[in-house]
Image (spheres, rainbow, N blue to C red):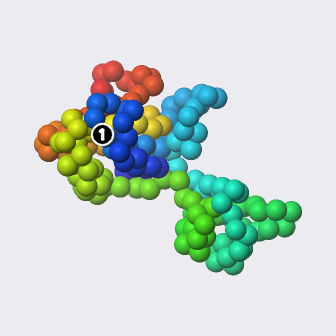
């Protein structure tokens, strides 16, 4: 299984030395009430709705072939019948509806990382793996670390520290 990445933050200056790209993995083995990335906790894709962005076109409801979106008594997604097909996100031009979590192969994610290689070289930066908890995906994380090192890219891991030290 490939892990889900819910965000790729470019030009970060707070997650290690230099200019960095931060990769946020979905899935966490803790459920801290103060979590700064609550969308990262679940290991599965989720549908997010941002009401402040909604322009009330209702195209999302029309495009949903499962009729999972309704506007009776305000906006509502029936998460029991939503299959996360992303039809609604394509028609939502204001990006009020988003799918949180995208699967990447290691080569695809490395392609995203290499887009910022010049910034890393110029600033002494690199890549920070965050989340969620990146060590939940230890085999994939290891593969990414090896790929980064093969390109001379500095790496950091932001972790809650709750993982198997033997595997690490």
Question: Circle 1 is placed at which residue position?
Answer: 19
Q: Is residue 20 left or right of residue 95?
A: left
- How many numbered marks are there? 1
Seen as rendered, the residue at the extreme front is 122
Instruction: Place residue 41 in its image quadrant.
Output: top right
Foreground pick, 113 / 78: 113
Q: Position of residue 98 (x, y in %)?
A: 57, 60
Q: Is residue 148 left or right of residue 37?
A: left
Q: Position of residue 28 (x, y in %)?
A: 50, 35
Decide: is 71 above or below 119: below
Instruction: Place residue 127 in its image quadrant.
Output: top left
Q: Position of residue 101 (x, y in %)?
A: 48, 53
Q: Is residue 89 left or right of residue 111?
A: right
Residue in the image at 56% along x and 34% along y: 36
Residue in the image at 82% along x and 62% along y: 74
Q: Is residue 134 left or right of residue 132?
A: left
Residue in the image at 41% along x and 28% along y: 159
Q: Residues within 10 Å of mark 1 (few under 14, many from 20)?
A: many
Foreground pick, 109 / 116: 116
Seen as rendered, the residue at the extreme right is 73
Residue in the image at 84% along x and 67% along y: 72
Decide: is 32 above or below 92: above
The answer to whether one can see residue 142 in this image is no
Q: Position of residue 104 (x, y in %)?
A: 35, 55
Decide: is 43 above or below 71: above
Q: Secondary structure at mark 1?
A: loop
The quarter of the picture where the C terminus appears is top left
């Amino acid at each position: 299984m490939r892990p889900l990445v819910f965000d790729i933050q470019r030009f970060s200056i707070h997650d290690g030395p230099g200019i960095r790209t931060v990769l946020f993995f979905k899935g966490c083995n803790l459920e801290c009430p103060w979590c700064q990335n609550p969308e990262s906790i679940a290991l599965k894709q989720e549908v997010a709705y941002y009401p402040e962005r909604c322009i009330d076109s209702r195209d999302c409801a029309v495009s949903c072939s499962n009729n999972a979106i309704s506007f009776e008594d305000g906006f509502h997604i029936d998460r029991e019948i939503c299959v996360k097909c992303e039809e609604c996100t394509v028609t939502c031009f204001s990006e009020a509806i988003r799918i949180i979590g995208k699967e990447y192969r290691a080569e695809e994610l490395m392609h995203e990382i290499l887009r910022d290689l010049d910034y890393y070289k110029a600033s002494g930066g690199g890549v920070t793996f965050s989340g969620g908890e990146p060590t939940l995906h230890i085999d994939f994380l290891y593969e990414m670390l090896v790929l980064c090192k093969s390109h001379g890219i500095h790496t950091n891991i932001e972790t809650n520290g709750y993982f198997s030290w033997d595997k690490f």
